[in-house]
Amino acid sequence: MGNGTRLGRVRGLGPSHHGTGHWLQQRLTALGNVLLVTWFFVSLIRLPLGDHGAVHRWASNPTVALALILLVISVFWHFRLGLQVMIEDYVHGEATKLLSLVILNFYAIGGAAFGIFAIVRIVLAPAAGLAPGGM
Amino acid sequence: MAVSIFHRITGDGLAIVGALMFLWWLGALAAGPEAYAAFVACVWKDPSPEISALHQVTNILGKVVLVGLTWAFFQHLFSGLRHFVLDTGAGYELRTNRLWSILVFVGAILATAAVWLYIAQEALHG
């Protein structure tokens, strides 16, 4: 350190070391969320949510299932980025910060995988209201 | 100030409570009619004639959480849209900034009230 341009001396020294890409991804997923979550919210209000068969038929429609998978990716990626900033701002001490970030990543990626797998199970479930059971 | 911290709080709430509720619902939907009925009986309404004490509590708690999530969703959505405008460099004048901050709060409360009045009215009429 000490040599190079002014920019070169500070590059990579922000709390996350990846400021710009993080910022941009937060906005891109935010835009995805505006579209996908609004669609999902309206769908939930219009669906007969107490009726398993009706909700299952809705979710197993290929277009709906694809939109749900995109929603899971967009939402979980968005909150992974958001909670990362929260941890970087409020959790001090390198060890606890690192541990918090590891837990956050396990939660976000594990949760998204669970969600996408559930959607796949719904789509591949046999028709006529049978429980998917063994897949 | 307040809008900013509420953006973080609602974001946290949606990411943890909202995402877990969503995954629970989705998992129950995939697992079949019995699992789905158990989910509904826990968070919304237990149809059995004798409702257990646990479900009496969770039926109320579920609705409180769902109303809270609805509000958090609108607050975070409107506040996020405000951030998109601020990102373009617009809206930093004190008066304008203050006006839109207030509108975010008012809009979120009105939208939440509208949604739940609609749900209540649907529940009453069929």
Image (spheres, coloured by chain):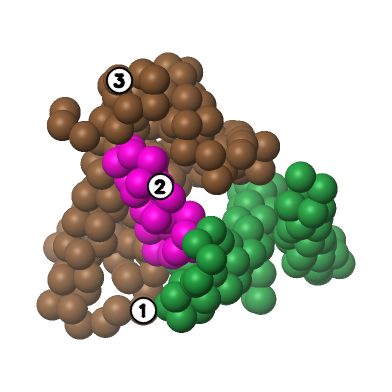
Q: Say which residue appears at 24% left-offset and 41% top-offset.
A: A113
Q: Quadrant of the N terminus of chain A?
A: bottom left
Q: Position of residue B113 (x, y in %)?
A: 78, 61
Q: Chain of mark 2?
A: B
Q: Say which residue appears at 22% left-offset and 50% top-offset.
A: A110
Q: Position of residue B110 (x, y in %)?
A: 81, 60
Q: Say which residue appears at 26% left-offset and 61% top-offset.
A: A104
Per the image, the residue denoted by label 1 is A90
Q: Earlier in the sequence, mark 1 or mark 3?
A: 1
Chain in green colour? B
Q: Say which residue appears at 67% left-offset and 37% top-offset.
A: A46
Q: CA distance from mark 1 to mark 3?
A: 48 Å
Per the image, the residue denoted by label 3 is A126
Per the image, the residue denoted by label 2 is B36
Residue projecting furthest to the front: B49
Q: Chain of mark 3?
A: A
What segment is highlighted magenta in the picture? B16-44
Whether marks 1 and 3 lie on the same chain: yes
Q: Colour of chain A?
A: brown
**Is residue B123 visible to the viewer in this orientation of the structure?**
yes
Q: Amino acid at mark 3?
A: Pro
